[in-house]
Amino acid sequence: MKTYNTILFDLDGTLTDSKEGIINSIRHALSYFDIVEDDMDKLKSFIGPPLKDSFKVLYGFDDHKADVAIVKYREYFKDRGIFENEVYLCIPEMLSNLKRHGKTLIVATSKPTVFAKRILEHFDLMEYFSDVIGSNLDGTMVEKSEVIKYALDKNNITDLDSTIMVGDRKYDIEGAKDAGIDCIAVLYGFGTSTEINEGSPLYIAKTVQDIEKIILG
């Protein structure tokens, strides 16, 4: 088994269960357009890909309408939805063990960096990470491959063979492959087992403990 020294972590569905806050924020945004959505599968599909893409694909919004929806989403999310969230069991212990073994941990998320940092600070997880890389509030750098590549460049990570991404959606798997690094896909997050298997990650983790076992051998 390979030795991994740098581990990139997705946030939503990997470190924290953010479903409630995200769904409530989406409903708040949709209500501005007099849309009532009760299809939980449809709402959950927002978790992972860029928000703008989801509003356009799922509701047929044009660019302007999708931008307005994001503003309304953040209206709710920035003060309420951001904390309708909880850390998955055993995450702090896993991160602590990886740090104790000398691993470099970085968050790489499509969520805006400012929100990601607030969440990590709120849940006392920031101490484990050497950097937090997310998207920009202006709607740039939202694609997961962009986020991962920027995280690698910013932190001068050139040994891609010893670097791995941990995430729960196909976007994490595809982004890691595009950046030339391996991926651990977790099954306890928001991606379905079908989605994960179709992405063909190098490793699949059913539990948080499995992540640690894969990385530490």
Image (cartoon, rainbow, N blue to C red):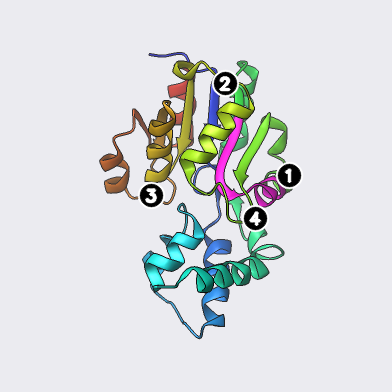
* N-term mark: 2 or 4: 4
Q: Whole-percent x and y of residue 200?
A: 29, 35
Q: Which residue in the structure is indicated by mark 3?
A: 191
Which residue is at 68% across, 38% downward?
125
Whether pointer 2 and pointer 4 mark residues with C-beta atoms closer than 8 Å, the reply is no
Q: Residue 126, relative to residue 19: is it above or below?
A: above
Disc 1 residue type (three-letter): Glu
Marks 1 and 4 sit apart, C-alpha to C-alpha, by: 19 Å
Residue that carries the numbered disc 1 in the rendered image? 121
Horizontal relation, residue 22 to residue 2: left or right: right
Among the two numbered marks 3 and 2 on one chain, the one whose residue lies closer to the N terminus: 2
**Sequence-wise, which precedes: disc 3 or disc 1?**
1
Q: Which badge, 4 or 3, is on the more N-terminal residue?
A: 4
Evaluate if marks 4 and 3 touch, with contact meaning CB atoms under 8 Å apart: no
**Numbered range of the magenta stretch:** 106-119
Residue located at (45% from left, 53% from top): 49
Position above or below: 3 against 36:
above
> Which kind of residue does numbered mark 3 sit on?
Gly
The spot of residue 174 in percent (x, y) is 37, 39
Task: Name which residue type carries label 2.
Answer: Ile
